[in-house]
Image (cartoon, rainbow, N blue to C red):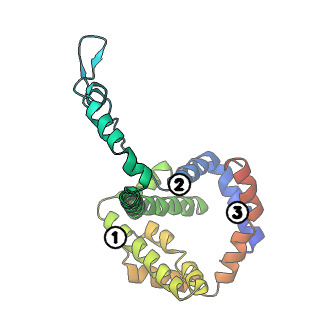
Amino acid sequence: MNYSRKELKKQAKQVLRKGYFMALIISIVLGVATAGSFSVLFVSNPFSQSAETNGADEPDFDGSIWGQITNRDWSEFDTAINEAGGDFADGEWQGDIDELLGNIYIELIKLALLIILAIWLFGLLFRVFVLNHLAVGAHGYFADAARDLPSGFGRLKHGFQKGAYLNIAAVMLLREIFISLWSLLLIIPGIIKSLSYAMTPYLLAENPSMRYKDALKTSAAMMRGYKRRFIVLHLSFFWWLLLGTLFFGVG
C-alpha cells in the first residue's frame, strides 16, 4: 500500500485491459445480488380457488365462493337491513362499527409488521448465507487479477466450497455484528471499525478457514495507518461511480 493513488489507478487500468469483460460480468452479478432484498408473495384468487371444470370450456363456479355469493337468497338480509334502518339512522350501531373498524386496523398493522419482519429475516439469511460468500469470491477474483494470477468466473464459487462455507458465513456475520455494535456508540466508531475490517473479505478469499479473531485482527493490523488514504482513494472514484451509474454501470 505504498503506491500513490495515481499509480494504483494506472495499475488497475492495466489489469482491466487484460480481463475487462470478466471483471464487468462479476461486478454486475455482485451488484445485482446486493442491490436489494427479494420477497415472494403468493396471492390466491378466492373466486377461482375452488372452482371446478364443468365440461371442456366452461368452469363450474357453483361450488366456489363466487357461486355462494351469487346463488344465495339475500331476501332475509334485505329485510333485516330495512328493519334496522331506524337504528342506523339513530346512530345506535355507530359504536359497534367503529370498534370493528378499529380491530380491522389493528390486525392490518400486525399483518404489515409481520410481513416486514419476514422480509427482513429473509434478507438477513440471504445476506449471511449467499451474498457474503459472493463478496468474498469477488474480492478474491480482483486480488488474483491484480497479481496477474489466473482466475475466472468460477472464483465466485470458492466461498461455497465444503469446509469453508460455514466459516465464511460466521466470520462475515461477526464482522457485521461488531461494526453494528460499534455504530451504536455513534456513527464515527462504526465507520472506523468498518475501515479496520475492510480487508476481511480478501483474507477469507486467500484463507477461507481463517478464524474470525485472526481475520479481524489481521485486517485491523493491515489497515492501521492507512484508513485516511483508504477513504480518500474511494472518494477519488466518486465521479466515475456517478458516471457509471448514469450508464447503468457500464464504463
Where does label 3 land, which residue? 11
Q: Is residue 37 visible?
A: yes
The answer to whether 22 is drawn above or below residue 171 in the figure is above
Of badges 3 and 2, the one in the foreground is: 2
Where does label 1 land, which residue? 167
Q: Earlier in the sequence, mark 3 or mark 2?
A: 3
Tell me where residue 146 appears, x and y as whole percent: 60, 62
The answer to whether 79 is drawn above or below residue 14 in the figure is above
Where does label 2 land, which residue? 30
Q: Earlier in the sequence, mark 1 or mark 2?
A: 2
Compared across the picture, whether 187 is left or right of 39 comes to right
Task: Give the residue drawn at x 26%, y 28%.
Answer: 73
Give the crowd class for mark 2: few <14, some 14-19, many >=20 residues within 10 Å.
some
Question: Which amino acid type is shown beneath numbered disc 2?
Answer: Leu
Tell me where residue 168 appears, x and y as whole percent: 38, 68
Decide which of 53, 187 is in the foreground and name it.
53
Compared across the picture, whether 99 is left or right of 185 comes to left
